[in-house]
Amino acid sequence: MSLTNFKTMDVNILLSIVNMQLRDKYSSLNDLARYYDIVEDELCQKLAAADFHYDAKSNQFK
């Protein structure tokens, strides 16, 4: 699933997709953002609006 339209996605679906991608394919949020050619800060802001924040140690949003 593509994340290019993450700005319009339901935040809970976005969280699920991002965490799955981080778990299965990408060793960091930066790698995921680079692969999908999205702005990492914008993705973080979208998820932070729903009180989800990236934890680099576990490589997931919580």
Image (tube, rainbow, N blue to C red):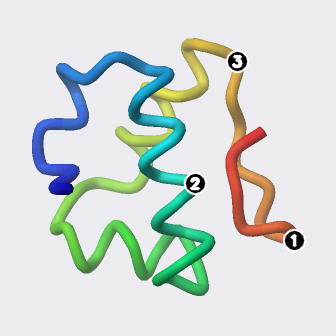
Residue 57: assigned label: 1
Q: Earlier in the sequence, mark 3 or mark 2?
A: 2
Q: Earlier in the sequence, mark 3 or mark 1?
A: 3
Q: Is residue 41 above or below residue 36?
A: above
Residue ID at (46%, 66%): 21
Q: Earlier in the sequence, mark 2 or mark 1?
A: 2
Q: State the image coordinates of residue 35 (x, y, percent, origin top left).
A: 24, 79
Residue 39: assigned label: none
Residue ID at (18%, 20%): 8
Residue ID at (58%, 78%): 28
Q: CA distance from mark 2 to mark 1?
A: 13 Å
The kind of secondary structure element at disc 3 is loop
Quadrant where the C terminus sits is top right
Is the residue under label 1 in contact with that under label 2 (CB below 8 Å)? no
Q: Residues within 10 Å of mark 3 (few under 14, many from 20)?
A: few
Q: State the image coordinates of residue 17 (x, y, percent, origin top left).
A: 42, 48
Tell me if 62 is positioned left or right of 12 in this view.
right
Q: Amino acid at mark 3?
A: Asp
The kind of secondary structure element at disc 2 is helix
Q: State the image coordinates of residue 29 (x, y, percent, origin top left).
A: 53, 68
Q: Mark 2 highlights which residue?
A: 19
Q: Amino acid at mark 2?
A: Asn
Q: Is residue 58 above or below residue 40?
A: below
Q: Nearer the viewer, residue 10 or 39?
A: 10
The kind of secondary structure element at disc 1 is loop
Q: State the image coordinates of residue 36 (x, y, percent, origin top left).
A: 20, 68
Q: Nearer the viewer, mark 3 or mark 2?
A: 2
Q: Mark 3 highlights which residue?
A: 51
Q: CA distance from mark 3 to mark 2?
A: 15 Å
